[in-house]
Amino acid sequence: MIENIKWDSAGLVPAIVQDAQSKEVLTLAYMNEESLQKTLETKETWFWSRSREELWHKGATSGNTQKVVELKLDCDRDAIVVLVEPAGPACHTGETTCFNEVVVANEKPPGSLAILRELENTIKERQQEMPEGAYTTYLFEKGIDKILKKVGEEAAEVIIAAKNRDREELTWETADLLYHTLVLIREQNVSLNEVLAVLQERHKK
């Protein structure tokens, strides 16, 4: 693969890093032959810093590593897309993605699945920081029994809404169930990726 890449005059190739699940673009970095080789060997992203003129392993300091799921060349073989499972924010500012400054904001299509990843990250932050007054903090403080009770209550509400053919109520209660389920799996130290992997495996069968 490496021998087929068209490196630029500095021996670099742009690498577009994308969340393998949500497909959100996380960052644009550059690789040289050595960093690409390390990426392939370690299955985590390595880049070449043009400002520092040195190799850098994403997450080596912050812990926000990126596990490589797939790596693809474009049709001209002068750019790379790296699909990853991020262990934390991609941006040094703490944002999920480096592309967070909105220039044009046309109406977005409703219901992007990316919200599940954002919600999972927010719940993780709440558990770590436990900000006063946050409902998620309250759930973690009360513990597993309270969280399980809420999951059970929301599941019952979904059943009732469906039985009553109440579309709006069903939508709201399903959203509540998804949120409380994400809190539950976070409390149990299970990631959304693990759950999605099971669905993916079942779908293949």
Image (cartoon, grey):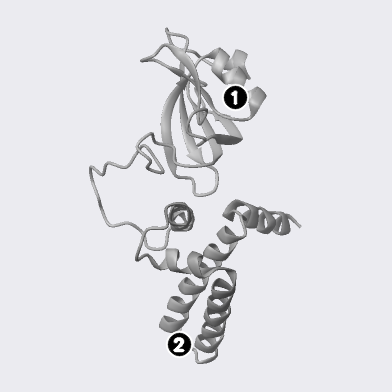
Mark 2 residue type: Asp
66 horizontally vs 122: left or right: right
158 horizontally vs 29: left or right: right
Q: Is residue 102 at all visible to an observer of this figure? A: yes
Q: Is residue 179 at all visible to an observer of this figure? A: no
Disc number for residue 82: none
Q: Image quarter for residue 3?
A: top right
Percent x, y of residue 152: 58, 79
Which residue carries the number 2 mark?
Answer: 166
Q: Residue at x 36, y 15 (%)?
A: 51
Q: Image quarter for residue 20?
A: top right
> Compared to 71, does 131 lie above or below?
below
Residue extending furthest toward the top: 9
Mark 1 residue type: Thr
Residue extending furthest toward the bottom: 164
Report the number of numbered marks. 2
Q: Residue at x 49, y 29 (%)?
A: 61
Q: Quadrant of the N terminus?
A: top right
* Helix, strand or loop status at disc 1: helix
Percent x, y of residue 197: 66, 53
Percent x, y of residue 180: 51, 69
Q: Quadrant of the C terminus?
A: bottom right
| Mark 2, other Cα within 10 Å: few <14 / some 14–19 / many ≥20 | few
Of the numbered discs 1 and 2, the one sitting upstream in the chain is 1
Which residue carries the number 1 mark?
Answer: 39
Q: Residue at x 41, y 81 (%)?
A: 168
> Compared to 24, does 160 lie above or below?
below
